[in-house]
Amino acid sequence: MHDLNNPFIRSHFAKQERKMIKKTGNIIGGVILATLLFIETISEIVGDVIAYLGEYYVIDYTLTSYLLQIIFSAILFVPPFFLIARIEGFRVRDIFVRKRVPFLTGGSAVFAGFLLCLGINVATNYWVLFLELLGMNTESVGLPEPTTAFETVAWIFTLSVMPAIVEEFAFRVVVLGSLRRYSDTFAIFASAALFGLVHGNFIQIPFAFFIGLVFAYITINTGSVIPAMIIHFLNNFNSCVMMLIAKNISPYAQVLVNCGTILLMGLFGALGFIYIKKKKLLGKKLYKPDCIITSPMAFGAFSSSPFVIALTAFLLLGAVMAL
């Protein structure tokens, strides 16, 4: 039995804990960075091949872009994170859905979480205006817009369904699951920070960070990633609908529909919050193991891991170049 009141013993164990966290950070950061570099290389090659073939064959660039986006998302967020889980020594199926969530509990969490996402979306709009006032470029190169009904369905699947599945698997199952042994608070903030960074531009980084906090907290409290997946889908689907309305009807109609969505979700979200508060469903105390170091110290150790630093620098450099 160790005397943890002894400062030398506490210092020794704190050093060991930091070492373990840095090791986990290097595994996560290194795997993600290597995968990003691989995808960057492959995407350049595939782009050149498609451009070359386009000179000789008729290629549907819109649907091809959607297909490639789906493939690259799957490559980025599925095999590497399975590898992380394997290295970290846990089975994905053990944490993917840990328990069945009652319908009212899950529904309340979804409505309340989506309402928070809508609020973060509004704040992001002001953030975009601020960046534009500073003279920064807020336009991002995205997928080509759909022109047919089939392309619209494929576009919505690419931007709404696919990210909700693979990104939640990566960050709320694997990353969050890997870091929770060091404390839930640390795991929530660290997984949200990585989730924000991988979005790669200064508009989405803060937005994704804050919604990442919401997704992680709901996943921990409900014991399942499914509510977070549903909220993620609804958030992205709402953005797609707003873009379609602005393009095919008018920006004024977009504002009206957006306001109506916020009011409607405000009602359901408020009911969700009331139900959650009454039943004390999401008031679960966050797990804190018998660690010497605190959650902020754990975050400092994680973020100072060499591969996490390299990943952060790579992603921030890309965000700067996009301005």
Image (cartoon, helix red, strand yellow):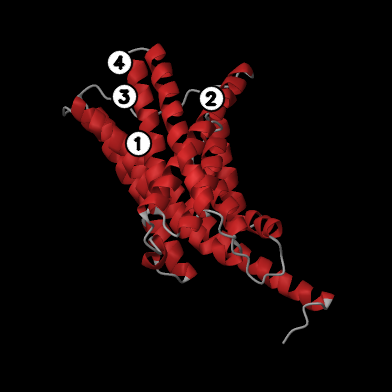
Task: Name above or below for residue 26 compared with residue 250.
Answer: below
Label 4 vs label 3, nearer the camera: 4
Q: Residue furthest right?
A: 7
Q: Which residue is mark 2?
A: 125
Q: CA distance from mark 2 to mark 1?
A: 19 Å
Q: CA distance from mark 4 to mark 1?
A: 18 Å
Residue type highlighted by circle 4: Asn
Q: Earlier in the sequence, mark 2 or mark 3?
A: 2
Question: Which quadrant: the C terminus?
Answer: top right
Badge number at residue 159: 1
Residue at the location (55% across, 43% down)? 314
Q: Which residue is mark 4?
A: 248
The local secondary structure at tag 2 comes to: helix
Image x and y of residue 87, in percent = 46, 68
Label 3 vs label 1, nearer the camera: 1
Image x and y of residue 109, in percent = 45, 47
Q: Which residue is mark 3?
A: 145
Residue type highlighted by circle 1: Leu
Residue type highlighted by circle 3: Glu
Badge number at residue 262: none
